[in-house]
Image (cartoon, rainbow, N blue to C red):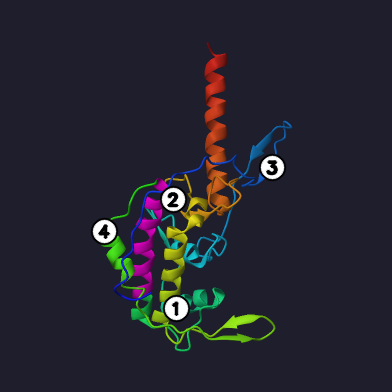
Amino acid sequence: MSPSTVLTFTAPPRRRAGPPGPWGRRRRAPSGRTTLGPVKEDPVAFRLDCGATWLNLLATRGRAFGARPVERLPDPVRFAEWLGLCDLAPVQPPHQDDLDRAVRLRETLRPIALATVDGRPPEDDDVRSLETFLGQDDPVALSVDGRLVRSAPPSTRTALARIARQAVDHLTGPQRDDLKVCPEGDCRGVFADPAGRRRWCPSPACASRGRVRALRARRSASAGTQGR
C-alpha cells in the first residue's frame, strides 16, 4: 500500500449480537445460591487474546477511558517484549521514538475502531493519520522452518506498518462485522467475536464487574418489588 493510497470507510450494518458468553468466575455462596466472585488479574500483563495483533495493540492501554488508565508499554524494553510475543520482533530493537510512534498508531486506531463498531464513519484526521503508517516499504520474504515463516521486520517502523495494514484489512473487510466493544465504560476495549457469543472483552475482570453489577441490580429490583 503506497503513501498515496486513499482509505475510505463506510458505516457497515451491524448484526444482532448473540447471547453473552460464559465469562467471569462463579462461586457457591453458603446459602447454596450461585453468586459472582471478584476476579483478580495482573493489570500490566499483556492481553494477546483480542483476536488480532492490532487489537492486542489497543489492549496495551488498559481501562483507556477510566480515571486511571493502565499503560502496558511504559518503556522500549516492554515494547520489545510485546513485539516478540506478536512475532514482530524487529532486527533492530526499538528505541523511545519507536515506542512513541507505536503509541500514536494505537491511539489513531482506537477511535477508528470504535467508530466502525458503532456504524459511524471515522474522523478524516484519524484516517489521514493512519495512512502515514502504511507507506513503509516491506517486501515479503518467506521461509520454512518447521512452518511457514515470514522474515522479521528490519525495523520497528516496518513492524508497525504490518500492524497498520492488518488493521486496515480488518476494518474495511467483511470481518469488521465480528468486532465488538466491551460495555464496561472505563474499558471500551475492541475485540473480535466471530462466534457472536461474547458480551465483554476477553478480560475476566470486565465480565466479573459487569455480572456483579447486574446481579446487584436484579436483587435491588426484586427487593423493591417485594417491599410493595
Which mark is on residue 124? Answer: 4
Q: Which residue is mark 2?
A: 188
Q: Which residue is depicted at the point 53% across and 25% down?
A: 220
Q: Which residue is mark 1?
A: 159
Q: Which residue is depicted at the point 28% across and 55% down?
A: 123
Quick check: 81 left or right of 71?
right
Q: Earlier in the sequence, mark 4 or mark 2?
A: 4
Answer whether residue 104 is magenta in the image.
yes
Q: Amino acid at mark 3?
A: Arg
Question: Is 145 or 92 nearer to us in this picture?
Answer: 145
Question: Is 99 or 132 nearer to us in this picture?
Answer: 132
Which mark is on residue 27? Answer: 3
Answer whether residue 96 is magenta in the image.
no
Res. 219 image quadrant: top right
What is the span of residues highlighted in magenta in the rendered image? 100-118
Q: Residues within 10 Å of mark 4 (few under 14, many from 20)?
A: few
Q: Is residue 59 visible?
A: no
Q: Which residue is depicted at the point 40% across and 46% down?
A: 118
